[in-house]
Amino acid sequence: MLEYLRIRNLALIEDMELDFSPGMNVLTGETGAGKSFVLKALGFLLGERLTADMVRPGAQRAQVEALFTLKEQDLVLRRELLAETGRSRLYINDELRSQESLRELRARLITHTSQHGQQQLLQPAFQARLMENALPCPELLRERDGLLDRLHEIAARREALQEKQAGLAERRDLLEMQQQEIDKVSPEEGEEEQLEELRAKSRSVEHLRENYENALELLHGGDNVGLLDLLGSFEKLIHAMSRDDPALTPDAEAVSALREQLSHLSGHLRRPPLPDEEMDMDKIEARLFALAQLKRKLRRSLPEILSLREEITENLSFLDVCGLDLSRLAKEESALAEKLAAVTARIRPLRRESAAAFAQNLENELRGLGFSEQVRVIPDFVAHELWPGINDEKVRILWAPNPGQPPQPLDRIASGGELSRFLLALTSVQPSAESATYIFDEVDAGVGGLTLNKLAEKLYALAKKRQMLLITHWPQLAARAQKHFQISKVVKEAATFTLCTPLDGSARYAELARMAGGGAQGEALARSLAD
């Protein structure tokens, strides 16, 4: 049960509080006063969207909060709408929660009927869901839906496999040619870098060898006289000169030392620091050339070629085993389809039986709402293919509200008033959570006269079992409420406000008279309703 509702800074509502009672609670007021917007605020609290422009000008946020009393606990919901971003925050018992949390809660808290519900009622898909909800075997419906989900999943996988298979089959020759080209060369990861490094190292060794050989040639000479021979001749000369000039003796000794040092260097130059193993440059160059040719043919870098090799292997392997996968999926699909056919066969007679009972209950409710005693509701079963090769039935509602009329769809013959009463009858026969509050938004639209009295009696009887919020323009309905709220619009200091006032005594009498048209006639009707 909804005990308390507070709305702040939402559109024309600055701060509104409503304390509800068990039974029937009515909201009345002039057209455009904001009655339906109170229900819109409640809808926002329970998950519906509102845009940022719904925040009252000048406020940072709008807020709607409510207290619901359930059997097992009290539940406090609060939802805020931020003016700056248009985003909302939901709190359940002061704990920040996601919007998903409301999905299961909503059905336990309210059952909402409105003019939108009338339009839904005209849709065959909605009627089919109504009939299915009346089935006494929800587990069979869950099993059917689960099997259908799995079949659709398998169909999607099969389609994806077949699409991939078709695409690869067209490219198979190219893939195999590319695989052969790659296999001829058989490149390895990092091979090109290693070969480039070996080639650079070989060139460095060759350069070192040439330098040592050039140094030896300079020392010993080739076609010409070498440095050591020249230095030997120079040594003999300088020693001879030192005998005549003793001052040259130190220089002669230095020249002798230099010749001995160069002779020692000659021995070292004959043993250059070369690798123990000679690198086969021809082999290295040939391998690098083969890799370069492969890159030119495939127009890819070596890492890309290695990735291509893996991709080709995977794709060709896929083509080899795809037929087996498709065969396995076909067997799985066939088994699931067989189960689906069996479940569907069990559901069909149960659906027909429950639809007949549902229609009978609905007829009884409609008779109590002013329809003819001969009103008929006929479930119309239309064949449709649930899955290829598996036929099922969809149900739509046909009715004949008056004797002598052939059964026709609701959208062919139902007036607004008839749809309003039909929706109320549906609410009475549909299962809903025991704690849920019924909300009727102008369910009395298009109804008048004696039918209005029957509608009032039906709503009053329903309100004895369940809390109800009712928006109405009829005093005959408002007079039966346990609690009456008047919604009004006022202008203060160039600003517009929507207000809510609980009515009792003379204030309620005055509102009933206004709803009855005012004047002496309105006063008389209000007086008769109050008696």
Image: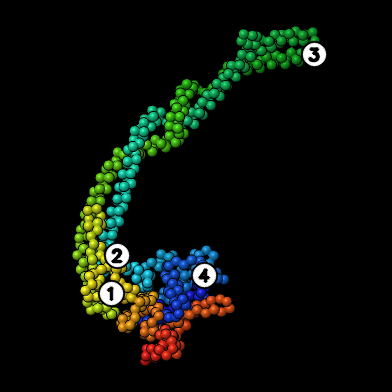
Q: Could you tell me the amino acid type at mark 3?
A: Ala
> Can residue 158 be seen by looking at this rendering?
yes
* Camera-side mark, 2 or 3: 2
Task: Tell me the residue at 42%/68% (across/down).
Answer: 47
Badge 4 vs badge 1, beta-carbon distance below 8 Å: no
Badge 2 vs badge 1, beta-carbon distance below 8 Å: no
Badge 2 vs badge 3, beta-carbon distance below 8 Å: no
- Helix, strand or loop under label 4: loop
Q: Could you tell me the amino acid type at mark 2?
A: Pro
Give the residue number, with chain letter if any, for mark 1: 429
Q: Position of residue 94 (x, y in %)?
A: 47, 71
Give the residue number, with chain letter if any, for mark 3: 247
Side (left or right) of 332 relative to 503: left
Q: Position of residue 298 (x, y in %)?
A: 43, 32
* Camera-side mark, 4 or 3: 4
Nearer-N-terminus badge (1/3): 3
